[in-house]
Amino acid sequence: MKWYLLAALGLVLGLSAQIVSAESNPTLPPRQPNGLALTPPMGWNSWNKFACDINEKVIRSAADAMVSSGMKDAGYQYVVIDDCWHGQRDAQGDIQPDAARFPSGIKALADYVHSKGLKFGIYSDAGRKTCAERPGSRGFEYQDARQYAAWGVDYLKFDWCFTSTQDAESSYTLMSDALRASGRDITFSICEWGKNHPWLWATNVGNLWRTTGDIYDGWESTPDKQNGMVNILDMQVGLDGYAGPGHWNDPDMLEVGNGGMSFEEYKSHFSLWSILAAPLMAGNDLAAMSAETKSILTNKEVIEIDQDALGIEGRRVFKDGDIEVWARPLKDGGRAVVLFNRGKETRRISVPWSALDYPADLSLKVRDLWSHKALPAAKGSFSSDVSSHGVVMIRLGA
Ligand code: GLA
C-alpha cells in the first residue's frame, strides 16, 4: 500500500477511536450517588461575615461557639473555611496554607474541629485561581483531593472563578471523581452560581449546587447590590423537582445575624430556606451572636422541617402580589406551610387545603413553629394575620 493510503487509513482509525472514547460508554454503569448529605448539610461558613479576614483563631472560635451556643445540638455539623486560607503550592505542587494566618496547619485545625464532634470543610476553585485569586485546583484535582483527605476534610466547596472556557459539567465531575478516589467521605458543594444549570446534570456529581450568584445581606436587591433575600427566593421557583436526598438546590448561605435585615426578616429568611430544603450554613459571627439571632438559628421545629427525611423541596403554592404561601410535604404525611407577607402592612393570609393536596373536609392539627404552640385544629383552610416582611410558619398533621 502506498504511504499516503496508509497515512489516511491511520488517520481514519485514529479519529474513530477518539470519537468512541469521547462518547459516553454505554457499557459503563450510570454514575451513582456518593451516599452523603441525605438531608441538607448544616454548618457554618466563614465567608458571609469574615470574607478574607480569617485565621485559625476565627475558625476555632466558630467551632467552640457552635458547641456552646447549642447549634451543634440543633443539628449544625460542618465548620467550613471559605476563600483565602491558601498560601502557595510547594515544589511538589502540594497546596500549602497561608502560614501567617494558619501557623498550626490545616490538619491541626481539622483535628480540633473533629475533637468537638464536628466536621471540617474547606474551599477551592475549579479554575486556575479562586475568586480571591489564591491558587485554584485546575490541573491539581487529584493531588488536592488526596491532600484534603490526608488533612481530614469532610466537605469541599468548589467555586467557579478563573475557569475561562472550561466546561462546568466535566470540571465538576473531575473533582467529584477525585474526591471519591481519595478514600474519604467528602461532601461536595458545587458553587458555579447556577450559570450552567447544575440541577440538570449534577444529581450524582455534587451533593448541593448553588442556584444563584452571591446573596446580599438585605431584604431585596438595590441598584448597587444584586441578590437580596427575596430576589434569591424568587429564583428558586421551578427548581424544586431537582432536589432530593443527596442532591440539594443551594440558594446560598444564611445571612441571619449579619445586620442587614430586621429580626422579622431574618425569621422569614430562615423559614423560607427551611421550606426550600436548603443547606443551612450559618454565615454570622457565632462567637458574638445576640440572643435573637441564636433563637432563629436554633429553632429546632423549623430545622426539623428543613431536615425532613422525605427530602421533597417546598414550592410556592400561591401568590397574589405581596402575599405568598409556600408549602412542603413531610414524611409523616403532614405539611409545612409558610404564609409570607412581602408587603409593608400586616395582611391576612389563608391557605385552603386544596392548595396542599388535602381533601377539603379534613380536620388537621396545627402547630405554630415560631411561637412553639399548638393552635386550634383547622378544617378546610388555615388563616392568620402576618406582619410586614414576616411569616407565620406552621406544621399541619393528623
Ligand atoms: C464566590 C462564591 C462565594 C465565596 C467567594 C469567595 O463569590 O460564590 O460564596 O465563596 O467566591 O471568594
Image (spheres, grey):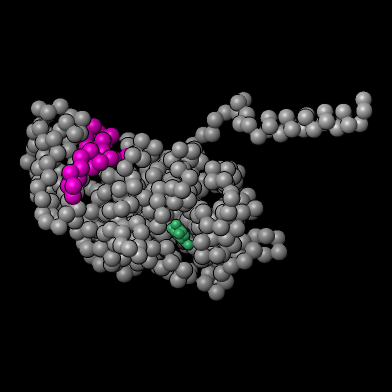
Q: Quadrant of ligand 1?
A: bottom left
Give the residue drawn at x 40%, y 43%: 248
Give the residue drawn at x 10%, y 32%: 380
Give the residue drawn at x 77%, y 33%: 14
* Image location (x, y in percent) of residue 190: 48, 49
Classify residue 116 by image quadrant. Answer: bottom left
* Image location (x, y in percent) of residue 157: 48, 53
Classify residue 283 by image quadrant. Answer: bottom left
Image position of 119 with respect to 334: above or below: below
Single out the residue that lies furthest toward the right: 2
Image position of 287 with respect to 250: above or below: below
- Does 332 appear in magenta? yes
* Image location (x, y in percent) of residue 81: 47, 61
Q: Majority secondary structure of the magenta segment? A: strand
Specify the segment rendered in magenta: 313-335
Image position of 81 with respect to 35: above or below: below
Q: Is residue 158 left or right of residue 353?
A: right
Whether residue 362 is visible, yes or no, is yes
* Closest to the observer, 192 or 96: 192
Give the residue drawn at x 36%, y 35%: 241
* Closest to the observer, 175 or 129: 129
